[in-house]
């Protein structure tokens, strides 16, 4: 490896992680907070893994188009949440996304990749808005945003991998979808 490449990596790491180490408590909210946000909310975790699993079920172009559309619109909605543009019924929208994504998997619903992308893009609005609205007060918006984008993409990838593993026994993936849907019902009654 060239020393120029190594210096470039160090400079990039310094810029990306500069908000992570703060000398004063309460000033967190950069990349690590963004990465953590989707991981520590069951609603986000289930929905994002389900997006990847359903994309796998759809197959073909949907494997990349469905998760990509979710991430793209989620990023835009995250910006809207950061600047506090009003969006009604965010928590209900998130719970509905868990319920519907679970049903799509449980019933192995087949649609075109474009329709699948549009369906998950609608859900991404609610998830992205929640991510942005819940950014720590003194957080760096772009670091936090990069964090939840990377975390979401990774969860979609996990969903793809899990679905591929369960595909050998098709009923197992559908059963997992039913459990996700049941979680969505529970989340809706809790709101």
Image (cartoon, rainbow, N blue to C red):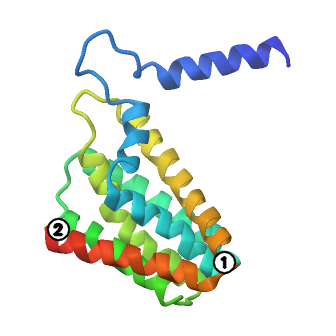
Residue at image point 39% right, 37% down:
144
The residue nearer to you, when weighing 175 against 120, is 175
The residue nearer to you, when weighing 47 against 67, is 47
Q: Residues within 10 Å of mark 2 (few under 14, many from 20)?
A: few
Res 56 quadrant in image:
bottom right
Quarter of the image for the N terminus: give it.
top right
Left or right of 165? Residue 131 is left
The residue most toward the right is: 1
Q: Residue 27: x percent and y percent?
A: 27, 21
Is the residue 77 above or below the residue 36 in the image? Answer: below
Residue at image point 29% right, 66% down:
94
Residue at image point 68% right, 75% down:
61
Q: Residues within 10 Å of mark 1 (few under 14, many from 20)?
A: some
Q: Which residue is mark 2?
A: 89
Q: Residue 122: x percent and y percent?
A: 37, 72
Q: Which residue is mark 1?
A: 167
Left or right of 165? Residue 91 is left
- As measured in the structure, the alpha-carbon distance from the residue carrying label 1 to the one carrying label 2 is 35 Å
Is the residue 136 above or below the residue 4 in the image? Answer: below
Is the residue 3 above or below the residue 20 in the image? Answer: above
């Amino acid at each position: 490896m060239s020393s120029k490449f190594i210096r470039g990596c160090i400079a990039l790491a310094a810029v990306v992680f500069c908000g992570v180490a703060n000398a004063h408590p309460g000033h967190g909210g950069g990349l690590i907070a963004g990465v953590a946000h989707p991981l520590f909310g069951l609603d986000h975790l289930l929905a994002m893994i389900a997006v990847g699993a359903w994309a796998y079920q759809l197959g073909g172009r949907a494997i990349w188009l469905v998760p990509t559309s979710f991430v793209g619109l989620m990023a835009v909605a995250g910006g809207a949440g950061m600047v506090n543009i009003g969006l009604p019924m965010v928590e209900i929208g998130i719970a509905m996304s868990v319920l519907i994504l679970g049903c799509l998997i449980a019933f192995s619903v087949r649609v075109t990749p474009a329709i699948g992308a549009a369906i998950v893009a609608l859900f991404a609005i609610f998830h992205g808005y929640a991510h942005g609205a819940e950014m720590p007060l003194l957080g760096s918006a772009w670091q936090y945003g990069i964090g939840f984008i990377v975390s979401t993409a990774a969860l979609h990838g996990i969903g793809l991998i899990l679905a591929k593993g369960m595909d050998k026994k098709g009923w197992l993936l559908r059963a997992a979808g039913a459990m996700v849907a049941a979680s969505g019902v529970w989340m809706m009654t809790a709101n």
